[in-house]
Image (cartoon, rainbow, N blue to C red):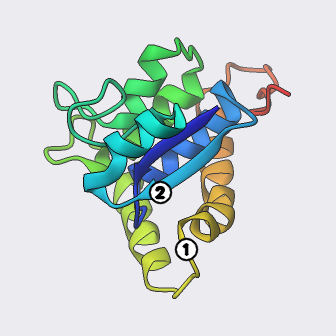
Amino acid sequence: MKWVTREKVKVDRVACPWLIKKFVDPDAEFLFVPADRVAEVAAREGAIPFDVPGVELGHHEGRCSFEAIVRKYGIDDPAVRLLAEIVHGADVSPDLYGRPQAAGLKAIAEGFRHLGLADDHEVLAKEFVVYDALYAYCRAKTAGAGEPARSANRQ
């Protein structure tokens, strides 16, 4: 399936593709376009729009697009829920959860924007490892005593 959002990705527009690839659509293809072209490209390509105003998988009720995807696709993983709170804090003001890791994630996302990477696809390729590591951290924090942490890959 194709997914489309605004170009020049940052926190939520990197976290959402990571979440989609790991928990919703392993074969997802992402399109990054100017904000004013998202609806047009979504219609033409049959793509699902995310993290743009006025779409189902966007910001609603003070929550970020990552949280909208978790809700829509019924992702019931305690580590993903914790990660959603961290992403929220890095992306949305006011922060509803106060997770201290959010400030670090925001700084990392800002740093990626200053690396001079070729395009949004290269940002995703490099930054997904950050989300893999953060998800592993969240799994460790939410794992019950003696329970092994599950893999994020559903493939």
Residue 49 shows in this picture: no
Residue 49 horizontal side relative to residue 93, left or right? right
Judging from the image, what secondary structure is the residue with disc 2 in? strand
| Residue at left offset 42%, top offset 17% | 71
Provide the residue designation for mark 1: 119
Quarter where residue 51 is shown: top left
- Image position of 151 with respect to 34: above or below: above
Quarter where residue 129 is shown: bottom right
Residue 30 horizontal side relative to residue 69, left or right? right
What is the crowding at mark 1: few (fewer than 14 residues within 10 Å), some, or many (at least 20)? few
Quarter where residue 33 is shown: bottom left
Front-most of residues 75 and 49: 49
- Image position of 59 with respect to 38: above or below: above
Three-letter code, disc 1: Asp
> Mark 1 near mark 2, Cβ–Cβ under 8 Å?
yes
- Image position of 69 with respect to 12: above or below: above
Provide the residue designation for mark 2: 32
| Residue at left offset 37%, top offset 29% | 57
